[in-house]
Amino acid sequence: MDRRRTPIGRRIPAAAAALLLVPLAGCDRPPAFPAAPVQVAEPESDSCLVSGRIVSKAWSDKRGGIERGIVRAWRIPEHELVEEAYGTGEEFQIRLPPGQYRLIFSANGSRGATFEVESRELTVADDVDRIPMDEVDLPISKTTGLYGRQAPELDGIIAWQGTSPLLVKALRGRVIVLDFFAYTCSICHAHKPDLIRLRDQYEGEGLVVLAIHDASLATLEEMNARMEPALRRAFGGAPPPFQMALDGSEQAGVFEAYGIYAVPAVILIDQGGRVVRRYHHAGDPELAADVHELLTRDLSKAF
């Protein structure tokens, strides 16, 4: 489930705009978009062109890049979303009428990288038509900080379905796909068949697939009951044919350990127990390609 979006240059009512900052259940960070040039609103007679670059030096140090920068301009003190701009690469441009704003900066990075948001306050005066801003440097998220490192253990799981308790360290030599989801997330359910196809194709070659529900529910029985409508649509009412687990703590569970604060999200772990990267959902074609690459590589040279 994506956050609500509006075209560049469209005014948004304050009541509707307020929803854009609420971390709705089943929403993810802004997903990747098809390549497109930066879009800018048609200039108003009194608008000012604000421009700059969104970078992440921490991600650049890991040879990563920014694929899509996102800027949201909130008028203060009214807290009204006035404009939203997104475009390919690091450059951003957004047009704003005179006023005081809080600009919120975020981005999508290569290899599924995500970042902490940054904000800056800006005043657009009546007689100013162009403001070049300093470079905005985004810290990498907790999830992205795990890339290349040993994956956190699956501590905090309170219930397992379709499997005995699993440990990352006990699965060394196998590729692991962790599918983080919630019963409220329609996109999560829509991509469960993709997860099953991936499992069916590669399970015999060393793939382990585990779907982990968030900590919003207390028991497997409650989880299955809540998921029943989605299960009827996806699997004809039958139990989901994959291994599942229920996270047991919002503060110290698996979601927190992996830095997953919105769903859907998928984490890939290699045969050495290291986090490879994050994906937006189980249907991402790069996930299947990366799983295949890991399972067919020469392990004698891998670690």
Image (cartoon, rainbow, N blue to C red):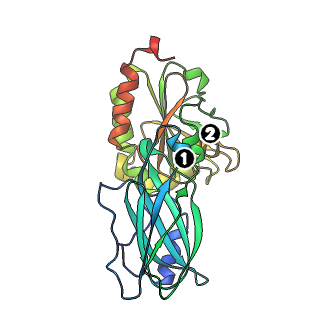
Instruction: Name the disc covering residue 57, or none.
Output: 1
Residue 279 placement (x, y as % from top left)? 44, 43
Kindly indicate the quadrant of the structure image that contains residue 207: top left
Determine the CA span between mark 2 and mark 1: 40 Å
Q: Tell me residue 19's x, y (percent).
A: 51, 73
Tag 1: amino acid: Lys
Q: How many badges with numbers are in the image?
A: 2
Q: Which of 88 and 23 is in front in this view?
A: 88
Residue 18 left/right relative to 44: right
Q: Residue type at mark 2?
A: Ala
Q: Is residue 239 visible?
A: no
Give the left or right position of residue 130, taking residue 125 as reference. Answer: left
Depicted 131 relative to depicted 189: above or below: below
Q: Check contact, mark 2 vs mark 1: CB within 8 A.
A: no
Residue of label 2 = 159
Foreground mark, 2 or 1, reads: 1
Residue 7 placement (x, y as % from top left): 35, 72
Residue 187 to residue 201: above or below: below
Quadrant of the drawing holding the N terminus: bottom left
Kindly identify the residue that appears in the image at 33 percent across and 33 percent down.
289
Secondary structure type for disc 1: helix
- The residue nearer to you, when weighing 225 against 255, is 255
Badge number at residue 186: none
Is any atom of residue 107 visible in this view?
yes
**Which residue is pictured at 62% across the width and 47% down the height?**
219
Question: Residue 274: x percent and y percent?
Answer: 54, 28
- Describe the element under mark 2 as helix, strand or loop: strand
Name the one closer to the observer, 64 or 227: 64
Residue positioned 50% across, 42% down in the render:
60
Q: Residues within 10 Å of mark 1 (few under 14, many from 20)?
A: some
Mark 2 or mark 1: whose residue is earlier in sequence:
1
> Most extreme residue toward the right, as rendered?
251
